Image (cartoon, helix red, strand yellow):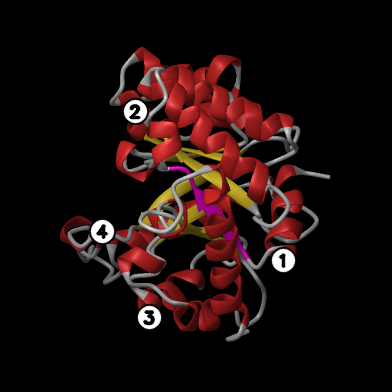
Amino acid sequence: MKLIDKLYERSKKNMAVCLGLDTKEAFLPEYISNMDITLGEKYFLFNKAIIDATKDIVACYKVQIACYEALGMDGLNAYQKTLKYIRENDGIVIADIKRGDISSTAAMYADGHFSGDFEADFITINTYMGLDAISPYFDYMKDGNKGLFVLVKTSNPNGHQIQDLEVKDGDKVYEKMAGYVDKWGSDFVGECGYSSVGAVVGLTYPKEFIEVKKYMPKAFFLIPGYGAQGGTGKDIAEIFKDDICGVVNSSRGIISAHKGKIEDESFTDITVKAVKDMQEDIGKWL
């Protein structure tokens, strides 16, 4: 079974929930905050507790590398241990790294994030530099065990400044990118009908989401913008009308849900409840 098929099956089983481990000091429960260890070590203990509590009820995890890079080597050690722990427990992990560079540099990013200390299952990339920015990853994807999520239509408020510009034929920039994603992914389609070259499209623009799907019918989506950014289960209903064709990320809405409620070892009871509430919010519209 290819990795994209495994992710698709888990997405159907667990109502498309992608749990984002965008860990910050403010999210730590007091019992971890008060430990006499480094902040990076605290991050990993926090992540580990969440993974242990949720590994059977989420489709995958997304780990935002910036949250760990900000702590220097201590944070990167926590990042590496988090990726490894997810994969050791048969989880699927998306490394949210958003790399984008010329082919020689992209080849180094491919080595660095599809093997070695920072090995992940999927990574996010920025291909607005064209084919050069994605082709070096293809060698790692031939056996079906790695995948990509390409930035297409992002959830941030100012993404429209570039992505919504019209080109000569009347299409918008993000629509052109969607067409390239469809082309680049054609050699990596799994049994589920979706490609290991997926797309990042934000839930904050639900109408545009429906339109952009037409440009890349075999793309599996990483969908940010749920919860704290304003997206709801109702917004997802039209996107998933025909099939559950992606995973929906929620980070702080889940991993900070315990704050002010439970600050001891049982904080993950609230985490689990937040995941199940998200599943219910999505499921009731499908």
Q: Amino acid at mark 3?
A: Lys
Which label is found at residue 101? 2
State the SS at label 3: helix
Precedes in sequence: disc 4 or disc 1: 1
Mark 4 vs mark 2, foreground winner is: 4
Can residue 145 be seen here? The reply is: yes
Residue beneath the point at 32% across and 61% down: 155
Kind of residue sitting beneath label 2: Asp
- Tell me the CA gap for discs 2 and 3: 30 Å
Identify the residue shown where x is 31% and y is 17%. 72
Number of numbered discs on residues? 4
Q: Nearer the viewer, mark 1 or mark 3?
A: 1
Say if the magenta span includes residue 74. Answer: no
Residue 260 x %, y %: 35, 56
Numbered disc 1: secondary structure: helix
Residue 49: name its quadrant: top right
Q: Residue at x 62, y 42 (%)?
A: 51
Q: Can you tell which of label 2 and label 1 is closer to the viewer? A: 1
Looking at the image, is 108 positioned above or below residue 156?
above
Q: Which image quadrant is residue 75 in?
A: top left
Could you tell me residue 104's position as x and y percent? 41, 17
Query: Is the residue marked by circle 4 packed among few (<14), some (14-19), or many (20+) residues within 10 Å?
Result: few
What kind of residue is marked 4? Asn
- Three-letter amino acid code at disc 1? Lys
Front residue of this view, candidates 41 and 235: 41
In the picture of the structure, the residue carrying the numbered disc 3 is 207
Residue at the disc numbered 4: 156
Other-residue count near label 1 (Cα within 10 Å), few / some / many at <14 / 14–19 / ≥20: some
Residue 152 rendering spot, x and y as whole percentages: 38, 56
The residue stretch that appears in magenta:
16-21
Q: Which residue is mark 1?
A: 12
